Amino acid sequence: MSAPWFSSWRGELIDNRSKPKEAYALSALKLPTSFDDRLVRAFIGWDGVAIFDPATDVARLAAEYAAQYQKYSEACGRCMPGRAGGRILFDLLDKIARGEGSAADIAELELTSCVMRQSAKCEIGRTVPRAIDHLLTHFGSVFSECIQKRRPSAEYGQEREFVAKITAPCTDACPDRVDIPAFIEGVRDRQMIESVKATRKAMPLAHTCGRVCPHPCEDACRRTHLDEPLSIMELKRIGADYETSHNLPFAHATEKRKPIGKKVAIVGAGPAGLTCGYFLAMNGVECDIFEALPVAGGEVMVGVPAYRMPSEKYLEDIRFVADSGVKIHLNSPVDAKMLADFEKRYDAILLSFGARLSKKIRCENENEELHGYWGAISFLDRVNLWEKFRIGSPIDLSGKTVICVGGGFTSMDVVRCAVRANAAKVIMLYRRDEAALIANTSLDEYNEAIEEGVEFIFHSSISKIIDNKGTVSKVVCSRYEMRGDGGGGRPQLVRIEDADFELSCDYVIPAVSQESDMSFLPAEWEIGQTGWGTIKTDGKTYATSRRGVFSAGDCEYGPMTIVNAVGQGRRAAGVMLGYLKSGEVKRGNDEVMDDLLRSFRVYQKGEAIGGYLGALARRHSSKLTPEERKTNHNEVNFGFSRDEAIDEASRCMRCYYIAMAAL
């Protein structure tokens, strides 16, 4: 809880202006009070204003906020109320703040605000006037004094820092902060290349994240308040697929900058490494990525099956990264000696080698030497290297029973690949319930697995593996239930006594989680590690305990989604670029503002929305039927047709917001 001097944020009026600090009323909201290591003097945005420093010049604050919106509205130009209103708001507020305003200007401000709230096409034009109205209402004397005394406001013309950010509920929920309304707008306007450019401003893997992203953005879509969320993930792939299908040259969102004379080595060509390399290369840094596998792409390439992520589509993203100048060295495992050499040859190093060791179930008689015990990573490597590249040999599970223990995307990939390998029976054991499994993966994945014949047994896990002369023959399973402690604490998962059961099987595949192999790191580096066995960074800049060595992706955070890894790679690139140029390790204002916005959440679940046409049904793309797909690795989801994509994109309400912190 915070104690603002004044706040009108989210309908909560806190007015401590006439009180001593020790008597300040507290806000029930999580207001943004700090900006990294600096205090926020005031915060202004779509839902009001919060002022923490009584010395804040509110007239200057209003004028600066209007200036930020004017930049946006001039570039947008989609509606007259938004564009002209932005110009009027800034002109009048700046005029008042510099001591040249009149009483008539206040009346015109109020009228302009009213017109914008009622007629602007998108949310940003309707919400910008809200905070300005609050300042005019509650701090009218400040504006009146500037007008009556014909003098500038207290801080007008002084050196002050203001950091602004355009966001949206969906963008804020995206781990990579992709400008989602922009790429949707490109599809709606039939400007497919502009759509993919909007995506690539934040992520180079448009094909990939348009297919296998868990799309948390859709949970934050304001359209849900009217009917159904937009199909954001499927719209993301449209621009990239258009570019590929028309054999067009790669569309980069920005021009590549001139070389800055710096070199970076990246260990691991997964999503984090590829993304970091791309953004560094586009900013003039020479990048070499070293990959131990015979193919680039990391776990997404060898772990995610082709029916979800076709290799030819991911390879297009990888070629796009290479088009920036990144050099990818395959079949190049790195050891301690090489890393020590890298430190001499390169100006910085990124460790992004993923988490490719399958964790054990931790049950009785668990033995990797047992025939039929098969780690999830090894299993999926074998499947995907063969199906995508014809490396190795195919898997035939005809007549076999496969039991997978897990509850995430990896375990889903395992069981659905086992079906495609012709297993007679495929079972997934999960200690929690159906809702938790769906939350970990997606409803579509779960439903498709059921359609393909996978059996799910919830609240269960293996307690013992039974073998017959070194070959897995069956498993003993325990049942669990959620049980409260009687004292009002959180319910705990507890094993049910005398409820064990047995299942006969030929294969046990643990897919409970993965961990990283740290054995190749130089001992003299003394790289810090977390209690989870991941590389320890400061949690913000991706800097390790070794100067010049950074880390991102699964080896830094633990197993994560692809879009999380992409987001980490982009943000790490920003920090590393600053380090290469100045020697300083710090985040840019944009990244800090992202986290500040995320901390108090842009999306509001209980928000009432009016003025839009509801009951516009969400489009659903065509898919292969269970019978068509369960014997092969063909892509299951066909994606939208051109007209379907345009129809779905037209449902977007363009929920942009603008926020600004005064420091």
Image (cartoon, rainbow, N blue to C red):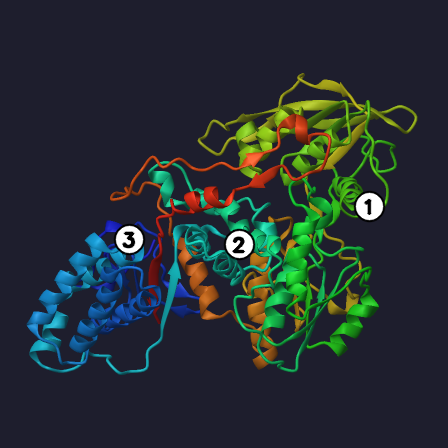
Residue 379 appears in the figure: yes
Label 1 neighbour load within 10 Å: few <14, some 14-19, many 20+: few
Residue type pointed to by label 3? Ser
649 to the left or right of 61: right
Q: Position of residue 478 (x, y in %)?
A: 68, 23
Numbered tag placed on residue 27 in the rendering: 3
Which sits in the foreground, 661 or 527?
661
Residue at (17% x, 57% y) in the render: 115
Label 3 neighbour load within 10 Å: few <14, some 14-19, many 20+: some
Work out which quarter of the rendered image holds the C terminus and state it. Answer: bottom left
In this figure, which residue is indicated by the disc labeled 2?
239
Which sits in the foreground, 239 or 547?
239
Q: Position of residue 266 (x, y in %)?
A: 70, 66
Numbered tag placed on residue 390 in the rendering: 1
**Mark 1: which secondary structure?**
loop
Above or below, 48 relative to 479 = below
**Mark 2: which secondary structure?**
helix
Which sits in the foreground, 114 or 13?
114
Q: Earlier in the sequence, mark 2 or mark 3?
A: 3
Above or below, 522 relative to 383 = below
